[in-house]
Amino acid sequence: MRLQRQKKSRFVLPAISLMALFMLSACAGIHSKPVSINDSQKPLRVIGLPQFSVSKKIDIRRENPVYAIIGVSAKVVQQLVREHKRFKYKDANPKLLQYSMRKMRQGIKHRLRKLGYRVVELDMDYWVAQKAYRKKDPRAKHIDALLRVEIKRFGYASASPYKPYRPGMVLTADLYATQDRKLLSSKVYSVGYDREELSPYELQVGYISHIQVADRRYFYKNFDTLMAHAVQSSKGLKFVAAVAAESVAGDLKKTSRRYIVAKR
């Protein structure tokens, strides 16, 4: 009986590992390469904007290669320190996350409307919005596509003890047709972060498109300096959110269908 249990556990662990690897691969598969909107698709007039998927915490982190060498226990300590820093920064800027997300939504809506789309604000997440469309809910009526935005990381980060904290955001933006759920446009953005700070594997994406923010007014040598300028530093994150909004909406620009025919 004991032998059977040992054999069973021997197979269970690899199965769990394979399942976790499969799930990670599936997540990254959606964002394995950029997908651009094109003219061969049915014309889009109305875009629904569901609620963003976003953590309730602004991320504050400084990577240290030494922890990776020491092992698991040191990583646990690093995580505890990171959580402590997050709470301290949130206490200094309690409404910053909500404000940044609200302004980002406004920026996306404004830019899309300038591009010729009608934008419908939806007080529901992406999956509920898809269900609402299928059930012919009046709130989702006449929507051609849903823009799904997921904020994977947002805050201040340093790639090593020798590099400054700098503001940044990593997000994915996927535009899905409501009628058949076809992926019309997809992109992964990193706005502001140091390239060395990000791991596509950890973020569960296959690539990252980097947008540099080189405004050194919002670079801070260490955490103490960041906290000494906590309120001022909020401007860096607001700026990053505005750049992200412009980038997401700008990539959905409609292209002209008119061609000039040259005569001989």
Image (cartoon, rainbow, N blue to C red):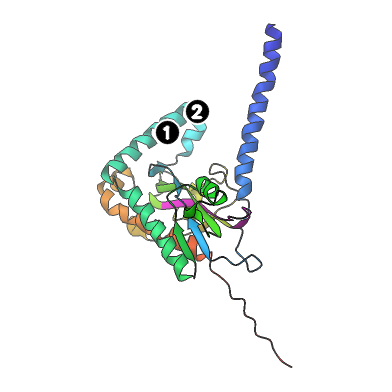
Q: Secondary structure at mark 1?
A: helix
Q: Which residue is mark 1?
A: 79
- Give the residue type at disc 1: Gln
| Real-space CA distance between mark 1 and mark 2, rounded to the nearest whole angstrom | 11 Å
Queried whether the magenta region covers residue 72, the answer comes back as no
Q: Residues within 10 Å of mark 1 (few under 14, many from 20)?
A: few
Is residue 219 visible in the rendered structure shown here?
no
- How many labels, in total? 2
Q: Give the percent coordinates (x, y) of residue 98.
A: 34, 49
Q: Secondary structure at mark 2?
A: helix
Check contact, mark 1 vs mark 2: CB within 8 A. Answer: no
- Give the residue type at disc 2: Val
Q: Is residue 261 above or below residue 191?
A: below
> In the figure, is residue 186 to the left or right of 166?
right
Is residue 224 visible in the rendered structure shown here?
yes
| Residue under the image location 62 percent in, 37 percent down | 23
Q: Which range is magenta? A: 168-184
Q: Give the percent coordinates (x, y) of residue 56.
A: 39, 42
> In the figure, is residue 201 to the left or right of 117?
right
Q: Quadrant of residue 8?
A: top right
| Residue under the image location 65 percent in, 85 percent down | 260
Which label was assigned to residue 72?
2
Queried whether the magenta region covers residue 178, the answer comes back as yes
Instruction: Assign the N terminus to one quadrant of the image.
Output: top right
